[in-house]
Image (cartoon, rainbow, N blue to C red):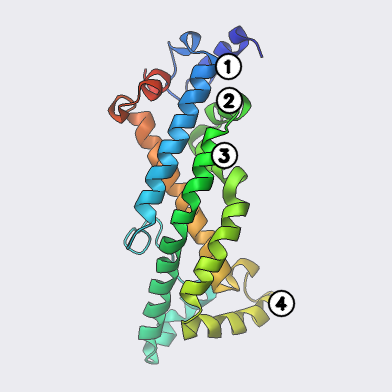
Amino acid sequence: MDRRQFAWTLAAASSVWPLAGRAAALTETDAAAGVRAALERGAVAAVGLLGRTDGFLGNPKVRIPLPGALEDAAGLLRATGQGKRVDELVTAMNRAAEAAVPEARTLLVSAAKSISVEDALDIVRGGDTSVTDFFARKTREPLGVKFLPIVTKATEKVKLANRYNAVAGKASRFGLIRQEDANVQQYVTAKALDGLYLMIGEEEKKIRADPVGTGSAILRKVFSL
């Protein structure tokens, strides 16, 4: 792609990112550097917000609820005096996610730094979920591998989790429970990743809304009107 064609592509994408009137002044290098900086800043900020006490449990946007079947039964469990166990499991699930998220920082930053011009263009064209889509495509599988042992360690001592897994595992084989909800540890790992990508997207929106406020020259150049 030559520079004239690249500038036209950025101009066409100005409805997605605020590059109108500046596209012709941007080079491929500028655009890629701006996207890398935005990705890295968003990733580091999201990890910082979530990877601490109450990062998940205290944030209604990402707080992890009980798996579907267990959530449906929660009222009955509370009515039969098992409310403490229900609350214990909810807390354990969210604490597990909070413990796992810091493991994402290195991989996310590496993915951001290694972004290609083609990836940068995909993000420019991709709309509001472009950053989430990029990180999910590049990092979801390896992060799932990193998160699962941490989540397992944090939840394996909760008796209700073990009881649920035993029952739900059998029910899923008969199609009574969704496969993704049949194991607490795998469920929490998936929800932790969902929450992480959601918060990265929130950080991206802040950068788009106020690039000057970031204090970064390249972000200001790429994202300012």
Identify the residue position indicated by label 2 in the image. 121
Callouts 3 and 1 close, C-beta under 8 Å: no
Identify the residue position indicated by label 1 in the image. 9
Q: Is residue 192 left or right of residue 114?
A: left
Q: Choose the circle earlier in sequence order: 3 or 1.
A: 1
Mark nearer the viewer, 1 or 2: 2
Numbered tag placed on residue 134 in the rendering: 3
Measured from the top left, where is residue 7 in percent x and y?
Answer: 55, 12
For mark 3, give the secondary structure. helix
Mark 4 to mark 1 CA distance (whole Å): 49 Å
Numbered tag placed on residue 173 in the rendering: 4
Front residue of 223 and 20 = 223
Callouts 1 and 2 close, C-beta under 8 Å: yes
Q: Choose the circle earlier in sequence order: 2 or 4.
A: 2
Write down the quadrant of residue 216 in the picture: top left
Q: Choose the circle earlier in sequence order: 3 or 4.
A: 3
For mark 2, give the secondary structure. helix
Measured from the top left, where is residue 100 in percent x and y?
Answer: 47, 61
Amino acid found under the numbered disc labelled 2: Leu
Mark 1 to mark 2 CA distance (whole Å): 8 Å
Front residue of 176 and 56 = 56
User: Which corner quadrant holds the C terminus?
Assistant: top left
Mark nearer the viewer, 3 or 1: 3
Is residue 81 shown above or below 47?
A: below
For mark 4, give the secondary structure. helix
Mark 2 to mark 3 CA distance (whole Å): 11 Å
Is residue 34 shown above or below 204?
A: above
Mark 3 to mark 4 CA distance (whole Å): 33 Å
Q: Choose the circle earlier in sequence order: 1 or 2.
A: 1
